[in-house]
Amino acid sequence: MNRLLLFCFLLISGSCFAQTEDSLFFRKIADEILVNGKAYENLRVLCKTVGARLSGSPGMYKAEDWGIKTLNAMGADKVYMQECKVPHWVRGGKDEAWITYNDVKGKEVKIVLDVLAIGNSLGTGSNGIKAPVILIHDFDELEKRKEEIKGKIVFYNISFNPRYIEPGSAYGEAGISRRSGASRAARYGAVAVLIRSLSESVDNNPHTGALAYDSSQPKIPGAAIGLKDADRLNTLLSTGQTATAYIKTMAHFLPDTIGHNIIGELAGSEYPNEFITIGGHLDSWDPAEGAHDDGAGCVHSIEVLRSLKAIGYKPKHTIRIVLFANEENGLRGGTKYADEVVTKNEKHIFALESDNGGFTPKGFDFMMAPALLIKIQAWLPLFKPYGVYFFDSGGGGADVSPLNKKSNIPVSEFRPDSQRYFDLHHTRNDIFENVHKRELELGAVNITALIYMIDKYGL
């Protein structure tokens, strides 16, 4: 056998041995999590004993305590808090809205709407706002009808595009109404906005979420309405019927307060000063328990630490679990974490976030150099038995993206099946009972396996 053939034989043999060794270790990870896993129980405790945990609320502080206790109980070598200032938006009570119109007999008809104030919006005050409502389907129509907007409540009825296979694409497109619709309408004299909830669900649960005001325009109130109410209002106004809307919300900001990233570490055996970060965001919106968004990501991350320690794996690099503060309406926790990495000149080789729910795993997106992605894609056959079939170039999770922007650290986000996510996202039904135990655990299996591969082979 000549030298070239011998080299190729040894290369292939070594690769096959590594694949077999890693495949066996994947099975060990899966057995530990699927048989002895704690993610589902940890999520139950978070949802049922803490519940909603919006930044600045009492629930936020209870969640921080839960994070510290849980990381310690799961075997972290070190647990600590990283302080950051967070916004303190308060809903201020029950949100109310209704419309009135005259039927064909001239009788006034009143329809009560199921609404939630949009996060970070300012309220109407105790008297509410009552004004004619105008139907707008997109910003192009807003521009064409700008002379009709003054003194009215704008109803943005922007539906999810059903042609997108991934609902996240529809969310990004339709979400412009929530993010900037209030300021766009205020430019032309609107007094408030109602938006169609960002979902394609078949229920009537309104979805909250954050808006961002344009400082050059008046800050007018905004509220989201349930999809059945949106359809009913759209049908009414599309016939040429005139209607008056009333909105009452008491939302307001209190001064910024102190919050914390909660951090747990599994010390590295060879490179203790080189870090791999895995995280989810600990805060949630206030209507429900934040089970999928993002309790699931928090318990996924903790399960990585617990399972590796339980099977006796000693990582080469320090694995750092971060339960981020304030992703929902400020991203202060992720920004603070990245700033500290820069300030301390820490070496980070990789960071991953789980913030797409606890559904059936499908893949991972990566933000990294093409050569690194090619290296990782070679591992994909190991993951396919556990339901993961793509490693794509794309984004990283919101909280880890600042690491890439500030320090060019490779980042990733876990991508489970997304078809049901926006049925629950930012609503009162994002509760523990809507998380499937097996799906949640399989997500933890795949995240743990990826972290093991990156720790073992580096980037």
Image (spheres, helix red, strand yellow):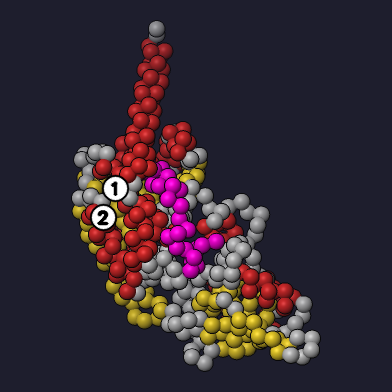
- Dot 1 falls on a residue whose secondary structure is helix
- Dot 2 falls on a residue whose secondary structure is helix
| Residue 234 image position (x, y, % from top left) | 69, 74
Determine the residue positioned at 52% across, 76% down: 116
| Residue 314 image position (x, y, % from top left) | 24, 39
What predominant SS class does the magenta segment belong to? helix
8, above or below 321, in the image: above
- Tag 2 residue: 71
For the magenta stretch, what is the residue range? 423-449
Determine the residue positioned at 72% across, 78% down: 237
Residue 451 lies in the magenta stretch: no
Question: Residues under labels 2 and 1: Cα distance?
Answer: 9 Å
111, above or below 72, in the image: below
The reply to whether discs 2 and 1 touch (Cβ–Cβ < 8 Å) is yes
Residue 425 lies in the magenta stretch: yes
The residue lying furthest to the bottom in this view is 127
Foreground residue among 110 and 396? 110
Q: Which residue type does callout 1 highlight?
A: Leu
- Tag 1 residue: 305
